[in-house]
Amino acid sequence: MDEALDAGINLFDTADVYGGPQSPEMEKGYGISEEIIGRWLAQGGRRNHIVLATKVYQPMDTGPNHRRLSAYHIRRACEASLRRLKTDHIDLYQMHHIDRATPWEEIWQAMEQLIHQGKITYVGSSNFAGWDIATAQCTAASRNLMGLASEQSLYNLAQRTIELEVIPALRHYEVGLIPYGPIGGGLLGGALRGTAQGHGSSTPPQTRVAELRPQLEAYEALCDELGEAPALVALAWLLHNPVVSAVISGPRAVVQLRENLKATSLNLSNESLTRLDEIWPGPGEAPRAYALGCGSDCCTHTATMLEDCRDGSTADGPLHSPTARCAGPAC
């Protein structure tokens, strides 16, 4: 962590649940990651130089009230995280998952209280759908709150589902994206070479590698042309996206950290970005991507209709008329 801080990294992200239980009774295990960071911060001279982020949602005990996003759990989980982190405030307090069983009014009331008490500064989300982000922001606005500052999602070259609705929502509400899994569990780190370069050196499942072999071959060939390690190209691709505020990188050794840092100075040309999109095509953005989703002539025709109907009509009549049907085969 000192090496990262000295290199200019200032976001340290964790969660109360990280560490995992070491017994079925959850007597010990959860909170270990926060405790490690807390001991590091207790050495002094670091707290004012970092953005400290943690999360709330997951079960922290066997009781029914020690999980999810009830006001009861949020307040107590925050107090417990502060104790483990050995600090008096958390810069970014993130909801680890959506809780559709708890009203947003209750969630925001609890977060608002923590903000007023100076225990948290910003609120973030993780693993939210696009409409969850919209609902959260609308409810926050009704309470005159800023709302979400960030969303942490699974996002990498090989897993781009959030481009459908999450990223458009983030752009609309000016919420930052913090991608996790940037190397796809090792898939984008040189999987065909038998070595994971950079990041955390995870080993991807061989079934996944076999399934994506043609794309991986093209990807690693492009990386060879660029003279860069595959993991660095994957990280640089994320950093190129203006909606990305920071990338969650999980190096397990100092040498991996130093390798990953090279991605911050790797500038990908427009040609390289285009070729990466060709190798790892994204889903597009909703709603147009939904019209194209089935891959038939019907969808292509429907997409054309959507492009042509800026005045609310098509060549066949009003867009919403029951007679304005697609001329292609049924989807």
Image (cartoon, rainbow, N blue to C red):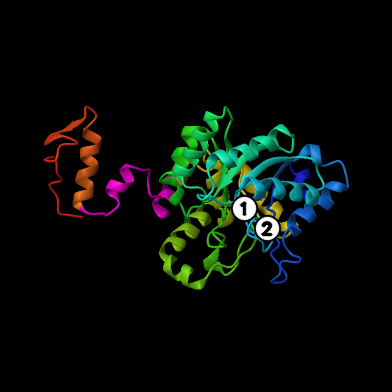
Judge the density around disc 2: few (<14), some (14-19), many (≥20) Cα neighbours within 10 Å. many
Q: CA distance from mark 2 to mark 1?
A: 9 Å
- Can residue 2 be seen here? The reply is no
Please give left or right for residue 83 compared with residue 251 in the image: right
Magenta-drawn stretch contains 215: no
35 versus 164 height, above or below: below
Please give left or right for residue 249 compared with residue 137 in the image: right
x and y percentages locating residue 151 in the rendered image: 56, 43
Secondary structure of residue under mark 1: loop
| Residue 237 image label | none
What residue is drawn where x is 24% and y is 42%? 303
Magenta-drawn stretch contains 285: yes
- Can residue 313 be seen here? The reply is yes
x and y percentages locating residue 114 in the rendered image: 70, 38
- Tell me whether circle 2 and circle 1 mark residues in contact (CB < 8 Å): yes
x and y percentages locating residue 16 in the rendered image: 70, 54
What residue is drawn where x is 60% and y is 67%? 195
| Residue 57 image label | 1
- Magenta span: 274-296
Query: Which sits in the foreground, 60 or 221?
Result: 60
Q: The C terminus appears in which quarter of the rendering?
A: bottom left
Query: Which sits in the foreground, 285 or 224?
Result: 285
- Disc 2 residue type (three-letter): Val
| Residue 17 image label | 2
What residue is drawn where x is 24% and y is 29%? 310
Judge the density around disc 1: few (<14), some (14-19), many (≥20) Cα neighbours within 10 Å. many
